[in-house]
Amino acid sequence: MNDPRARTFVFAQVRMDSARRLVTRDGRPIVLKPKEFDTLLALVEEDGRVVDKDELMARVWPDSYVADGSLAKNISVLRKGLGENVIETHRGRGYRIAVPIGALNSTDAASRVEYGQTPPEGIPQSAETTLDAAHAPSAGKAASRAWARRPGPLVLAAAAVVIFLFVVTRFIAGNTAKAHPAVHSILIEKSGGLDPLNEGFKLARPEGAYTHIMRNRDNTGFDRWRLVTDDQNFYYRKLTDAEKEFALQRDWKLSCVCSLEKGAGSSNVDLGPGIGPRFDMAYLQEGDKYFVVLTSQISPQYEFAQKIEFPGLADIDHPHTYELRYDHLAQTASLWIDGQLKASGYRGHHQYQENYGLMFGAATYRDVKQSSMVFRSVRFEAQ
């Protein structure tokens, strides 16, 4: 497995040719999309080691930021093609290949065999060596001529300096790229009735009860997630500093298809600390009235840049769509409800910036002892 020349892997009736990007099972081809193939290759190359989700996503999507949902879909496709027991899930960590893996080097005779084919008769396995030997006299003459025309000491010294500078430059550039990977897009999404923990989110207070999947009465499917708390609790997905800076240099959108049962809830994106503001869409119940607000201060008391009354916020069966759309030129965000502009000029705030990135959850408000917020989807995207 450690031989860098290994190009073909064999496991569980599966043959994977990494050079030709071909996968077969029992001799029949398995059709995979490029990112699905890359996901499998990343797992196979680790030879049974558990590969963390973050590491796996960085290898499969090195130039973009995507949610764990994309990785989960790839794993699902691979399991259908390879067999359910080939890829093992380690909850909260990542995935690994759970069967023994064999590798064939490019110099192995077996690696020369095509799928269901054999090398033509009469061609020795060491054909390259035979050809090299046949041309050895010519090669010797060429070497003699090259030695007669060898460069002088000054030329060699100059070449050495050029090579040294090239290597140093590439080393510095390589390390800089690793320390600050390029960001070309950001997409983080909580989708439907899936457990947010399986989509790459973490829960601020994991010791509490949080499994509250909800059924859609219109189609009998499970497409929403309820979070209940007697204090405050939220799911979050962090952003790197490079991603925060990228988002502040682009137009981005934070959207939440959600509803408030009681108390208060929110969907926020934190681009700090020390880099950008925190933007909050909060959802409040005050008696029999419901409001969508843009928070400008949290402590010592809540203050709102905008407060819009919206009775539809309490419609659990048919959640509405709330969006913050950021204009990077104006450095302000606007609030849209169901595609209609409701407020603009929101600049966010800088309180309680704890590097949580994208957040959504519930919190008690006023005299409500227990709050409940229902989410169908939460999405943050910047391109």
Image (cartoon, grey):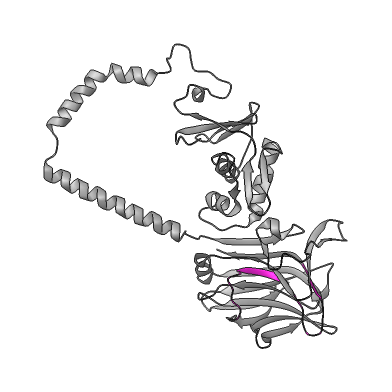
Q: Which residues are magenta?
A: 351-374
Q: Quadrant of residue 64?
A: bottom right
Magenta residue check for 354: yes
Magenta residue check for 147: no
- x, y percentage for residue 46? 55, 42
- x, y percentage for residue 131? 33, 18
Whether residue 47 is situated above or below residue 324 in the rendered picture: above
Please name whichever residue, 213 or 185, is drawn nearer the observer in this view of the structure: 213
What residue is rendered at 65% in x and 29% in y? 13
Q: Quadrant of residue 136?
A: top left
Q: Is residue 364 found left or right of 270 in the rendered image?
A: right
Q: Is residue 169 found left or right of 218 in the rendered image?
A: left
- x, y percentage for residue 360? 69, 69
Whether residue 229 is situated above or below residue 53 in the rendered picture: below
Can you name the residue that lies furthest to the front here? 207
Can you name the residue that lies furthest to the top here? 122
Whether residue 221 is situated above or below residue 341 in the rendered picture: above
What residue is rendered at 35% in x and 53% in y? 171
Whether residue 160 is situated above or below residue 143 in the rendered picture: below
